[in-house]
Image (cartoon, helix red, strand yellow):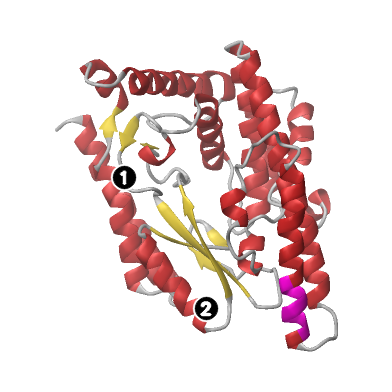
Amino acid sequence: MSPEILSNKAQLIKFAILLALSILLVSCETVSYYTQAARGQLAIVFGREDIQRLIDSGDLSSDLDSKFSEVMSIREFAAAEMSLPVEQNYSSYVDVEREHVVWNVFAAPEFSTDPVNWCYPIAGCVSYRGYFSEAGAENYAAGLEQEGFDVYTGGVDAYSTLGWFDDSLLSTVMSRATYQLAGLIFHELAHQVAYLPGDTTFNESFATAVEREGLRRWLDTTEQSETIAIAELNRDRQEQFVNLVSLYRYRFDSLYQEEIGEEQKRQEKSALQYQLRAEYELLKGSWNGYDGYDAWFSRSLNNAQLSTVSSYNDLVPFFNDLLLQSGGEMNEFFDAVNTIIAMTVEDREALLGVY
C-alpha cells in the first residue's frame, strides 16, 4: 500500500475521531453541521495532488510551475530557519473549484459589537461558524437575522487544521503574490506550534508575530528589497484600516451604552456607519489609488462585521518582545509561548494584561 494511501487512511481515522468527539461533547450543535464539515474536509483530503509530482510532470504553465517551486522553497525555509512543523504540510495542492474554501458566519446583538461565540472541541470557543458552502452559510445567517442579530458572512481562503491533518495549498490563494503565500504558510503553521483554545486574540497575535518574523527573514535571505517595501506598505495600510475600524467600534460601543431609546440608537448607529465610510474615503485618498478595502466597506458595517476587525493583533508587541528575549531562537520562543499557555488563567492574564 502506498504512503499516500496510508496517509489518507490515517487522516480519515483522525477525522472520524474528531467528528465523534464533536457530536458527543457539543450537544447543542446539530449532526448536520458536523456532517457538512466532515464532507468539506474529506473532499480536501482526497482531492490532494502532490506538488512535487505536478512540477515533475512538466504539464504546468510557467507561472504555476514557478509558484509551486517557490512554495516548496518556502516550506524548506519554514522548517530550517523558523523551526515550524512543516512535515507534509503544503506539499500538496487542491483545486477546490470555488472562490473561497469556507464561509464564516459572524453574529452580534443589534446594540453590541461583542460577537456571539460558538464552542467546539479542540478549537474551543470562537466568534464564527464555518461552512464549506456559501449557501449553507447564508442559510444559517438568515436564521440568525430572523432572531434579531446583526449578521456578517465572509469568505475564507485558507485555514489551519491545527495539526489534525496535513494542510494543503489551495487554489483559493494561488492569485496571491509569492511573499503573501510565504506569510500565509508561516502564519498557519504557527497555529500548529501553539494554540490556546478559545482565545482568538492570543492565537492570532502569536501567529501574526511568527508570520512577520518569518517574512522578514525570508525576504532578507532572498534579497527582495523591493518586495520588502511593498510588504511594509501593505502592512501599514492594514494597520491604518484596523485602527480606523477599532476607533469606530469604540464609538459604537459608547453609543450602545447611552440611556436613550432604541429608535434613536438605530438612527445614530446609521449615522456612525455613514461617518465611518466617509473617513475611509479620506484615508484611501492617501493610498495612491489602493482600493483593497473597498469591498469590505461596501457591506453593511453592522456590529457583526465590525467584530471581525477587533484587536486580534493587540498582543503582537508582546510576542515580539518575547522573541527578542529568546535571542531570536524560534524553538526557545515557542517553548516560552507554550509555557504561557500552560499557566492558570489568572497568571496568564496577569502576565499579558487584560485585553
Residue 148, quarter of picture:
bottom right
Magenta stretch: dominant secondary structure: helix
At mark 1, the secondary structure is loop
Quadrant in the rendering for residue 134 = bottom left
In 3D space, how far apart are the residues under numbered discs 2 and 1 (Cα atoms)?
A: 29 Å
Mark found first going from the N terminus, 2 or 1:
1
CB atoms at circles 2 and 1 under 8 Å apart? no
Q: Quadrant of the C terminus?
A: bottom right
Q: Specify whether 227 is left or right of 79.
A: right
* The magenta stretch spans residue 265: yes
Which quadrant is home to the N terminus?
A: top left
Q: Residues within 10 Å of mark 2 (few under 14, many from 20)?
A: some
Relative side of 205 to 59, left or right:
right
Residue position marked by numbered label 1 in the rendering: 96
The verdict on residue 239 being magenta is no
- Which residue is identified by label 2? 145
Q: Residue at x 72, y 50 (%)?
A: 281
Quadrant in the rendering for residue 223: top right
Q: Position of residue 127 (x, y in %)?
A: 58, 63
